[in-house]
Each structure stands twice: as structure tokens, then as C-alpha cells.
Image (cartoon, rainbow, N blue to C red):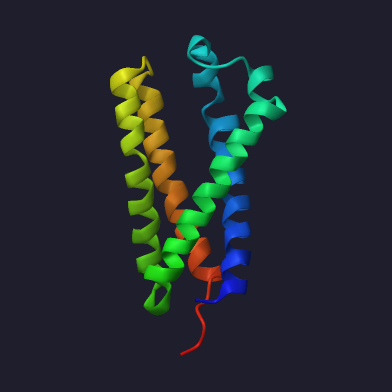
Amino acid sequence: MNLKRLLISILIIFVALTVTDGLIHGLWLKPLYKATHELWRPEAEMNSGKYMAWLHAAHILAAITFTTLWAVGFAQNAKASCAVKYGLFMALYGQTHTLISYAVQPFTLEIVWKWIISACAQGILLGLILYKVYKPKAA
């Protein structure tokens, strides 16, 4: 495993994840969140340092997990098609929680489907980014 490249890749995936989540949730899904405002913390509270820190912690944990699993299990002989599949399957695995949440919380089905669709697109994008930035040590 190429430790320097791994750390750089974790940072790049963290940034890409944070930016894409901002676009997905801060722009595309914002009208749905406003329409279901009773299900969420007030926006000012969400944007406070206390809760934003938890969101960043989640992004860091996701970036470390996503990148390290790729590095130890897939990067050595990977092709772009492998990166697409990896990103898609990691996203689908993460969406199991979305389906469980829908079963126990009053989310709208529209929100659930848009979470799943956006997560799959995001996962594929992150997989391709990782394929480009993480290079294993030469054999």
C-alpha cells in the first residue's frame, strides 16, 4: 500500500464527498427538506459548529473507509469499470440505512428515492476519482 498516496486520496475523497453532499442536500434536495421541515433540526441549528462537526466527522470516517478498502482490496489490478462497480456497491450498501430509516421514520418516499439515486451517482463519481488519484506501489 502506498501510504502517502493513501493519505492524499483520503483528503481528496473527503473534499469530493463534502462538496457533492453540499450540492445534493444544500441545493437539489433543499426544497424537499423545507417542505418537510418538521422532520429536521432548524437550519440555523444544523449549521452551528456543534452539528456541522458531526457531519464533517462522518465525511472523514466515510473517506477513510472508502479509500482504505479500495487501497487494500481493489486498487492493485483495478480498471475504471471496477471503480464504477466499487463506488456503486459501496453506495448501495450505505443506502440500506436509508430503507431502514424510511421504515421507522416519517420520511417521504420521494426523499428516500432521491437519497438512493444521488448516493449511487455520488458513489460512482467517488470511485472514479479514487481510481484516478490512488496508485498502488509499483510491483
User: Where 32 sits versus 16, above or below?
Assistant: above
User: Where 121 sits versus 32, above or below?
Assistant: below
**Furthest-bottom residue in view?**
139
- The answer to whether 77 appears left or right of 138 in the picture is left
- Tell me which corner region of the image, top left, top right, bottom left or bottom right, holds residue 76: bottom left
Q: Where residue 28 appears, x then y in whole percent?
A: 54, 31
User: Where 50 sits versus 61, above or below?
Assistant: above
- The answer to whether 60 appears left or right of 102 in the picture is right
Residue at 46% across, 69% down: 71
Residue at 65% across, 32% down: 52
Q: Where residue 98 appears, x then y in whole percent?
A: 36, 32
- The answer to whether 8 appears left or right of 107 in the picture is right
Residue at 58% across, 64% down: 9
Q: Where residue 102 appears, x then y in whole percent?
A: 32, 23
42, 112: nearer the viewer? 42
Q: Where residue 57 appears, x then y in whole percent?
A: 59, 41
127, 68: nearer the viewer? 68
- Tell me which corner region of the image, top left, top right, bottom left or bottom right, holds residue 6: bottom right
52, 84: nearer the viewer? 52
- The answer to whether 11 appears left or right of 111 in the picture is right
**Furthest-top residue in view?**
38
Q: How many marks?
A: 0
